[in-house]
């Protein structure tokens, strides 16, 4: 990734990084959502993580007019994290937007984010959007509101958009570093923490990103094991000292937020004993969040108490838009 200087030119180049592996239909849909952007100056960098059908062949017949498309193919499968970093390193744009191959964008997303960048102070280097989450049998709209100096919010476990909601100024990436590809999960949140140390955030409080995330039992189980055995220890190692620097309160809240996520994943993977342990630890470290008490109570009876609670939460999520505030 070349060194750039924010120019605030009318239509600075935006590099869209799209990692993909073995999902040709999803790739076509994601690429079309990039081509349909109203913003006029986009390069699309597709990182093919050694799919059986090369991404260049998949996209050969697609009408991706108006954007420059560059397909880069890994010679072996290296995982989504390394694919994403390959794309960031090759990006030429003043701004970098990330899009997973099973996600899509509103046609105005890039234009709105570039405008927000241009109208903000030079200290702003990240603009993110609200998101619709499609779980298959229901959808949930989440509108985020946290902006400015958000390091403490991230450490406290507040919700932020994932990779596909972000636009990042290329200037701050050399300072913050690339996403840490050792993380099998939480890579986006961990990167956001580092970005927040070098930049202020702005949010567009509207749904401009669409995520496809159906629950699959085998993947949920893997997610829990990965978070417990790899992501949690790494996150604590990298950022516990940062949290403690703000005071004991932030250190405890930081640990509680990670344990709460672990507990939720354990519930979804039906590891009820682990769920009780993680959720009760979360409450011990930070007993001031009602939602964490509710999940801990739901875990006490195993599947007999969790399933009714899960169904009630689905029904609630299907009829509301959730606003995440600071």
Image: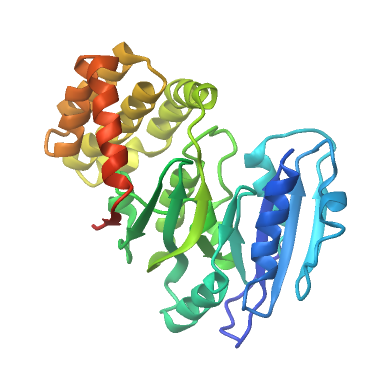
Which residue is pictured at 20% across the width and 16% down the height?
A: 300
> Which of the image's four quarters has the C terminus?
bottom left
Which residue is pictured at 50% across the width and 41% down the height?
A: 213
| Residue 176 visible in image | no
Q: How is the image coloured?
A: rainbow
Which residue is pictured at 67% across the width and 55% down the height?
A: 29
Q: Quadrant of residue 54?
A: top right
Above or below for 118 versus 315: below
Q: Position of residue 103 (x, y in %)?
A: 58, 52
Q: How many marks?
A: 0
Q: Position of residue 46 (x, y in %)?
A: 74, 54
Q: Is residue 168 found left or right of 224 in the rendered image?
A: right
Q: Position of residue 200 (x, y in %)?
A: 39, 66
| Residue 242 visible in image | yes
**Of residues 131 and 310, the one drawn nearer to the viewer in this rendering:** 310
> Which of the image's four quarters has the N terminus?
bottom right
Q: Is residue 234 found left or right of 41 in the rendered image?
A: left
Q: Quadrant of residue 182?
A: top right
Q: Is residue 156 found left or right of 283 in the rendered image?
A: right
Give the residue furthest to the top.
273
Which residue is pictured at 45% across the width and 63% down the height?
A: 128
Q: Position of residue 172 (x, y in %)?
A: 53, 63
Above or below for 171 versus 249: below
**Of residues 94 and 266, the one drawn nearer to the viewer in this rendering:** 266
């Amino acid at each position: 990734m070349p060194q750039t200087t924010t120019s605030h030119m009318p239509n600075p180049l935006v590099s869209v990084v799209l990692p993909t592996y073995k999902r040709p239909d999803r790739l076509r849909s994601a690429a079309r959502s990039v081509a349909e952007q109203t913003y006029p100056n986009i390069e699309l960098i597709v990182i093919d993580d050694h799919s059986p059908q090369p991404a260049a062949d998949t996209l050969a017949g697609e009408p991706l007019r108006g954007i420059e498309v560059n397909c880069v193919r890994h010679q072996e499968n290296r995982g989504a994290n390394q694919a994403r970093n390959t794309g960031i390193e090759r990006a030429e744009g003043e701004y970098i937007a990330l899009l997973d191959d099973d996600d899509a964008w509103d046609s105005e997303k890039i234009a709105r984010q570039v405008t927000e960048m241009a109208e903000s102070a030079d200290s702003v280097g990240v603009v993110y959007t609200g998101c619709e989450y499609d779980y298959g049998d229901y959808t949930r709209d989440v509108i985020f509101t946290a902006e400015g100096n958000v390091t403490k919010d991230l450490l406290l476990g507040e919700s932020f958009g994932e990779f596909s909601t972000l636009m990042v100024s290329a200037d701050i990436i050399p300072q913050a570093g690339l996403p840490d590809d050792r993380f099998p999960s939480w890579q986006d949140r961990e990167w956001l923490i580092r970005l927040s140390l070098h930049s202020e955030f702005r949010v567009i409080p509207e749904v401009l990103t669409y995520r496809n995330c159906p629950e699959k039992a085998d993947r949920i189980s893997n997610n829990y094991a990965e978070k417990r055995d790899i992501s949690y220890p790494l996150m604590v190692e990298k950022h516990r000292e940062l949290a403690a620097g703000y005071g004991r309160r932030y250190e405890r809240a930081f640990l509680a937020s990670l344990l709460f996520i672990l507990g939720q994943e354990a519930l979804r993977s039906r590891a009820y004993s682990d769920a009780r342990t993680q959720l009760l630890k979360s409450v011990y470290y930070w007993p001031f969040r009602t939602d964490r008490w509710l999940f801990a109570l739901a875990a006490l009876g195993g599947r007999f108490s969790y399933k009714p609670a899960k169904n009630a939460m689905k029904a609630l999520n299907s009829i509301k838009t959730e606003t995440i505030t600071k």
